[in-house]
């Protein structure tokens, strides 16, 4: 029997490494039997189904929709003779400059806001809300990014609430949120008295840090855990909002956000076409849309002069 001693396992105490190896093997075996448990090293499920303390926050312009919602809204108002052709041309140029420049100059943005506010001044809120429904069908519905729409739907399917968070007028944002089946929208609020726009804002535009404050306030009201929430945006101006949540996403990012997202190891998604847009982060579709709007205005002006 001594000759067969080498076949007999030796009794010896388990080392820490062997205990770890055994536990890992047992855990892997258990997980292969239970398909609901992700395999070792797999990325955890996200969004987490049934997590009522989680929600998602989506920027609008060039994140959910190609181009600027305010510009498309302006096109619809021009069609309804709310303002003159020269105003549309100016508005189109402002939007094209903003999108192609890739950054926001405070004075330039103030000019854009004042132009928009002057257009709606004196009109009834209910009138603009009703027109917004029509304008969505005419100019916005076909400009929704399918990829971003799918991300929002994933959160909805998981039982989570989904909000738009945008500097666009809240009336526009609410229409878009409702049409997409989202929970609601946070947007810039224009002042009204007795249901009529005064041409002023309530506070300031929901932009940059203001977006982060809005999300923070909503999270408190809804009892959300921001570390379990997600946020999506294309702009470096939304870094404060993206930094609030545990799951930040850079969608069709501008060059500054793309760089920052890579440094922070955030996830990136780019649904634009064209290698140049992907490389330098220029919102190609938005820029082309704005320039096209300016061209349309020039054509209209030419026809009027004929």
Image (cartoon, rainbow, N blue to C red):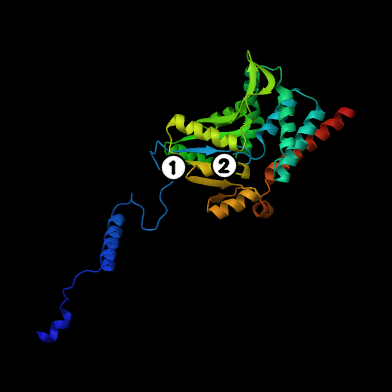
- Foreground disc of the pair 2, 1: 2
Q: Around disc 1, counting alpha carbons within 10 Å, would you say few (fewer than 14), some (14 to 19), or many (20 or more)?
A: some
Quadrant into which the N terminus falls: bottom left
Relative to 91, 169 lies left or right: left
Asked if 150 appears above or below 197 in the picture, the reply is below
Q: Residue at x 30, y 61 (%)?
A: 24
Label 1: element kind? helix
Question: Which residue in the structure is indicated by mark 2?
Answer: 240
Q: Residue at x 55, y 44 (%)?
A: 147
Nearest the viewer among 205 and 102 is 205
Asked if 250 appears above or below 108 in the picture, the reply is below
Relative to 12, 205 lies left or right: right
Measured from the top left, where is residue 211 in percent x and y? Answer: 57, 35
Instruction: Say whether disc 2 or disc 1 marks the residue closer to the N-terminus.
Output: 1
Labelled disc at residue 293: none
Relative to 254, 46 lies left or right: left
Q: Around disc 2, counting alpha carbons within 10 Å, would you say few (fewer than 14), some (14 to 19), or many (20 or more)?
A: some
Q: Residue at x 71, y 37 (%)?
A: 106
Nearest the viewer among 188 and 7 is 188
Q: Which quarter of the picture shows residue 212?
A: top right
Q: Which quarter of the picture shows residue 176?
A: top right
Q: Residue furthest left?
A: 1
Question: Which residue in the structure is indicated by mark 1?
Answer: 228
Asked if 230 appears above or below 69 in the picture, the reply is below
Q: CA distance from mark 2 to mark 1?
A: 16 Å
Label 2: element kind? helix
Measured from the top left, where is residue 148 in percent x and y? Answer: 55, 42
């Amino acid at each position: 029997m001594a000759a067969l001693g080498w076949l007999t396992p030796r009794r010896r105490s388990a080392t820490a490494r062997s205990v770890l190896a055994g536990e890992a093997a047992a855990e892997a075996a258990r997980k292969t039997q239970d398909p609901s448990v992700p395999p070792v090293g797999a990325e955890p499920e996200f969004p987490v189904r049934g997590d009522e303390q989680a929600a998602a926050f989506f920027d609008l312009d060039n994140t959910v929709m190609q181009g600027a919602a305010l510009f498309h809204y302006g096109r619809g108002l021009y069609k309804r003779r709310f303002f003159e052709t020269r105003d549309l041309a100016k508005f189109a140029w402002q939007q094209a400059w903003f999108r192609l420049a890739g950054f926001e100059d405070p004075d330039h943005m103030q000019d854009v806001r004042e132009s928009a506010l002057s257009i709606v001044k004196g009109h009834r809120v209910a009138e603009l809300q009703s027109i917004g429904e029509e304008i969505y069908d005419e100019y916005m519905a076909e400009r929704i990014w399918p990829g971003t729409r799918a991300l929002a739907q994933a959160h909805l399917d998981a039982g989570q609430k989904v909000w738009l968070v945008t500097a666009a007028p809240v009336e526009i944002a609410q229409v878009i949120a409702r049409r997409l089946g989202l929970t609601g929208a946070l947007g810039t609020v224009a002042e009204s008295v007795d249901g009529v726009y005064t041409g002023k804002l309530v506070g300031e535009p929901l932009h940059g840090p203001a977006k982060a404050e809005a999300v923070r306030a909503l999270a408190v009201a809804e009892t959300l855990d921001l570390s379990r929430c997600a946020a999506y945006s294309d702009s470096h101006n939304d870094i404060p909002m993206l930094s609030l949540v545990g799951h930040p996403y850079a969608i069709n990012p501008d060059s500054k956000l793309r760089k920052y997202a890579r440094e922070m190891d955030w996830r990136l998604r780019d649904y634009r076409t064209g290698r140049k847009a992907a490389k330098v982060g220029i919102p190609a579709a938005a820029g082309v849309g704005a320039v096209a709007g300016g061209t349309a205005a020039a054509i209209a002006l030419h026809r009027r002069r004929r």
